[in-house]
Amino acid sequence: MKTLSRMFLMAVILGLALTVQPVCVCAQARQFGEYDVKAVFMANFFKFVEWPSPVREYRLCIYGSDPFGQSVRTLEGMKVRGTMLEVRRPSSLRALGDCHVLFISSSERRRIRAILDAVRGMDLLTVGDTEGYAQEGVMLNFYIEASKVKFEINLNSIRSSRIAVSSQLLKLGRMVGDE
Amino acid sequence: MNRNRTVERSTDRRGRVLLLRVLFVVLLSLIIAPDPAVAEGEDSGPSELAAMPIEDLMGVEVSTVLGASRYEQRVSDAPASISIITSQDIKRYGYRTVADVLNSVPGLYVTYDRNYRYLGAGGFLRQGDYNTRMLLLVDGHRMNNNIYDTAAVGNDLILDLDLVDRIEVIRGPGSSLYGSNAFFGVINLITKGAKHVNGLELSAEAGSFDANKQRATFGRTFGNGLEMLLSATRYNSRGQSLYYKEYDSPATNSGWSDGNDYEGYSSFFTNFKISGLDVQAAYGSRTKGIPTGAWGTVFNDDRTKSTDAQGYIDVRYRRTFRDNQDLSVRVFYDYYRYDGKYLFDYPPLTMNRDLAVGKWWGTEAFYKTRIGNRHTVIAGLEYRDNLVQQQKNYDDSPYAVYLDDNRGSYSVGVYAQGEFIVSDRVLLNLGARYDHYKDFSGRLNPRAALIWNPMEKTTVKLIYGEAYRIPNAYELYYTDGNVTQGANPGLDPETIRTYELVLEKYVKDFRLCLSGFYYDVENLISQQSDAAGLMVFANTGRAEGKGIQFEMERKWPNGFSGKFSYSFQEVTSNQDGVGFANFPKHLAKFNAFGPIIRNWLGAGLEIQYASSQKNLNSTSDGGYTLVNATLLAEKIFRNLDLSFSVYNVLDKKYSNPASREHVQSDIEQDGRTFRLKATYRF
């Protein structure tokens, strides 16, 4: 019992130690949550894309069940190239017209073709993070390799839309074709 | 005596009930606790990331695992409870060997008898067992040898820890993918590629007892895509003078073993990669003096020592086609040699030799595809041919052979695993592997995992798995001419069934993990005394283990990080509990790192607690707490890394239970030691 109580004491002290916020503000490399990284990637995409009509406010839409949660909160109200960024979670396909970047969640796997058909002609940059989405026609699709977030690009989908994606972004991704 | 035992048992039970209650409350609060960031409306997101240019984002690491399904997947999707240790942790906490790393992993425990390091998991650690129940992989290449099944985790591992990028510890049975040996878990070491090194890197270390290590590594990526890595390491340590009260008589140097704790190794590693082709070759040899007088050898004589050498060549070709199909083929050749020199006084003084030579080659094919954009399916085939499995025991002069056993064997394994998406929040992972070994009937080992995300950043895993282990050549055929040890070619494989429940939750910058397991081992292979008093390996029956584990990890945006884990584990068997007592029931581990000056000077602190363990005489040691500390300066004078580590800072006197070959019941471990390390990149 002695060792047990000693151990509990230690557990409590060490557990508490973790809840205290240390006071030193210095940058250091660390691991991030997967969706924290993907969210910032999407904010970055706005820098490399030109839409056919002038944009007053950038809108990032998340369609389907939201895997980001907290991760997109810091993006809200952020300025990209001097333009405000707004995050929306439209619930119907008709509401997608206002979006500039559309993230299609993996929950929409079964409806992906219907969604892509519905948004054709809406001038959206479609983004996903589900294996196979790029082959289905999603423009940029995240995947993970060697613990790092990367993305594949369906160039046919981009070319058949009216948006222009900078070659700077294209050279960072991996090209895939339609299935 | 009897009364004492009852009292001990009842306090134990009370403690357990208390523990279960605490853990139940924690579990419940974890599930229902709202995300505090949401509740407080506070910004805790990726503000640090937001400032990063896209090129830097491409280099940010997220948490994935390769070894759990043989392909890269999110830790939260993997059908197992997983711990990952990165090269950054290795630097920050001054880890010297894989054994050091594993001692920091929740629920794992490594002991040392001044010859080898012994790894225990799930409360299970058998005396005289050379880590046969954990599968050790280097980039997917099986490292357990074909004589003793050893998973080397000390300096006898031929891979320098400095070359390791990540260590994945995958708990639970892995036989559904890997076959034999993946009994309690799989440890996958992922090496650094040429990209990590890029140029010449020189490293030198100096530590207590004249320990010194030098390493030279060269890495380069060529214009045609060729990635090349070459590395060589050499290590030497004089060791310490050790006192053993069991030998305290004038005839045996009053119990002092002087100059027999030496250790030395050298190792080479090379890796070439070009468009899908990956060639790896490694070789290493390590010699350790045996200072303990084990097996009744002459005490305090430096001629008694063990040398383990191992090497392999592994050629892999990987191709992705039609974007969703992966095919890889692997061919490997492995070599292992053990040379044990034991000085006995029969009389006269005679050098007895144990020689083991293992050579094997094998091939593997692996296929991964996606079905209907929803499900990931893999299948594989593995063939292994043990060309040489030789064990020899003889006296040098006069020459007398006690054992000269030459064997050969083969095995074939077929496996498949599917990850099925049942709904948005539910994944089902099903897998099985069928193995056929020469001389043993075939066996199918299944694994099933239900992975449920009841809410954002919360994962619940329910896992059932079976695994087995084929008796190795040493257990089957080794004998020293029936003097102390006999052979038992009639051994059967041992099997295990495991149930696990894992709950993982991310709250703000915290990661919390709570898990519990229960397992049941049948036909356990363990060393017994037969009617004639001879030690033989036998299938001795059953063992049951259960445990619970809590882990909390936090990474602050300002560079501080910390983790704490507690685990309770208990194993019972039908054999009087002998041999099961040497794993502490309670383990607690704490690690913290913080920057001191900007991002170039930092300090790592490690505290490890192990509760009382019993040795073979059923004596308890009362438990111990160890503190290790490291000061790390990175990128000073351009490319110089310096670190200074102190191990066992409090100079705590503690011991590990000894196995049967020792007169000692416990082997005392190192007191306070230090290491200074410098690494420069050109």
Image: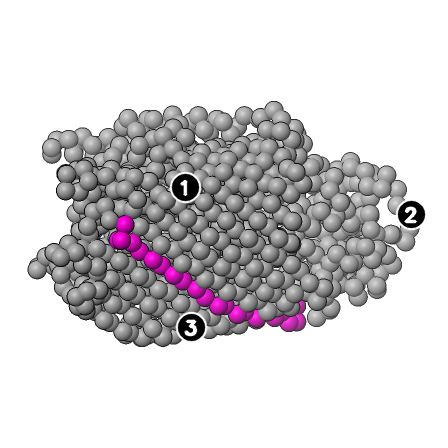
Instruction: Please give the range of residues in magenta.
Output: B302-324
Q: Amino acid at mark 3?
A: Trp
C-alpha gap between disc 2 and disc 3: 64 Å
Circle 1 residue? B210
Chain letter of the residue beneath label 3 in the structure image = B
Q: Main structural element of the magenta stretch: helix, strand or loop?
A: strand
Q: Residues within 10 Å of mark 3 (few under 14, many from 20)?
A: some
Q: Amino acid at mark 1?
A: Asp
Q: Do pointers 2 and 1 mark residues of a single chain?
A: no
Q: Secondary structure at mark 3?
A: strand
Q: Amino acid at mark 2?
A: Pro
**Which residue is rendered at x = 38% and y = 74% of the image?**
B385
Chain letter of the residue beneath label 2 in the structure image = A
Q: Is residue B428 left or right of residue B480?
A: right
**Which residue is rendered at x = 28% and y = 65% of the image?**
B355
Q: Do pointers 2 and 3 mark residues of a single chain?
A: no
Q: Secondary structure at mark 1?
A: helix
